[in-house]
Image: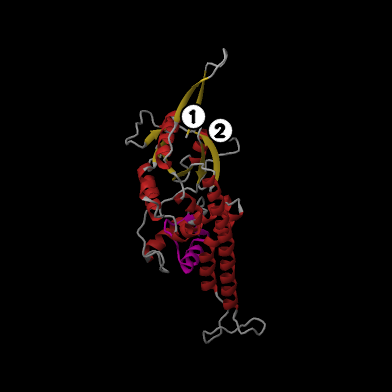
Amino acid sequence: MVLPTKTPDRKLIFGKETLEHLTEKIRGSKEITAVFLNVERMATPTKKELEAAWGMRVFDRFTVVLHIFRGNARTREARLQVALAELPLLRSHLKNNGAPLDGRGRGSRYIMGSGESFLQVQQRLLKDKEAKIRRALERLRRKRLLLGRQRRRREFPVISVLGYTNCGKTTLIKALTGDAAVQPRDQLFATLDVTAHAGSLPSRLTVIYMDTIGFLSQLPHSLIESFSATLEDVAHSDLLIHVRDVSHPDTEQQKASVLSALRGLRLPAALLDSMVEVHNKVDLVPGHSPVGPHAVAVSALLGLGLEELKAKLEDAVLRATGRRALTLRVQLAGAQLRESELILW
């Protein structure tokens, strides 16, 4: 249902008549088991009031995306980032549930003579937890920067693969590298970590493809902050690939969301200008023809257009890194050794 709402962070998100109409519809329909409100965050009192009125769970964008993130967090860094993103929700619940109050409205229960109320103790514990999570993430960030410097010292060009969630980034990386360990999944935010995969370009130059977290329109701000460290690797790339699902009805809106998020990362202008746009899933859009000098149509699943894409990537990588591919033909003596070919970068 599409309905007007008041300011989402107010206690009363709907007008009285709208709320009564909704309550009657929800209560009278046995097949409805939960309600999703398309707002970024509901105030905790609003959530509690609506759940009491409707007799079922009520979700907003923040809780739905956080639930998906929690289910897909597999590495220690991803779990720490989800835990950090969850803290505002825990603080909100604590603030609204609070400690028992006496009749005069002041906190009346203290913990073991410490001079702290139950609410103050819980707030302090959450603050300590946040500090501990941030320290752990900082250690992981420094380790990732060290690994990145080691990659650059070995002179492996880095290509970051970006795109809206579930656009086929991981499938494309598997097609480009032939890495059997890469297992794409048809679900939102299947990738919550930046993972590196080695591949070769037509001139046999080895490159590193970085699989990144997917983007989402109107992603809650606290979730963006929590995962911003994950996207730091993007800024150190030599080339960006923006993968688009051109079969999706909202593909243009998804493109705008990704570009907006990338601008928010304050990436170098030259990196954004050289970005290669991959129109994925063209097998589902007969007759699709990409527009623009940096656009290539492929089907990562079926292997269509991959050779053209690799050629374009090689050209872009050579320009970005200042390399040149030179072919030297050397005459060798001997009846069986006629001519050898050596490629230098």
In the rendered view, would you say 281 is above or below 62? Answer: above
Q: CA distance from mark 2 to mark 1?
A: 22 Å
**Along the viewing direction, whichever of 118 and 243 lies nearer the viewer:** 243
> Residue 92 at x, y = what percent?
51, 69
Q: Residue furthest left?
A: 292
Residue 64 shows which numbered tag? none
Most foreground residue, 293 or 156: 156
In this rendering, position of residue 75 left or right of residue 297:
right
Q: Residues within 10 Å of mark 2 (few under 14, many from 20)?
A: some
> What residue do we see at 37% from left, 48% from top?
259
In what element is the residue under mark 2?
Answer: loop
Q: Residue flagged by tag 1: what amino acid is it? A: Ile
**Which residue lies at the image location 50% right of the left edge and 27% below the top edge?**
342
Identify which residue is drawn at 66% across, 85% down: 113
**Residue 36, magenta (yes or no):** yes
* Residue at horizontal 39 percent and vertical 34 percent from the top: 296
Q: Which residue is mark 2?
A: 178
Looking at the image, residue 174 lies above or below residue 60: above
User: Picture coordinates of residue 62 (x, y %)?
Assistant: 48, 58
Q: Between label 2 and label 1, give the one nearer the viewer.
A: 1
Pick whichever, 180 or 268, lies toward us: 268
Tell me which segment is drawn in magenta.
Answer: 34-59
- Disc 2 marks a residue whose amino acid type is Gly
Q: Residue beneath label 1, please?
A: 343
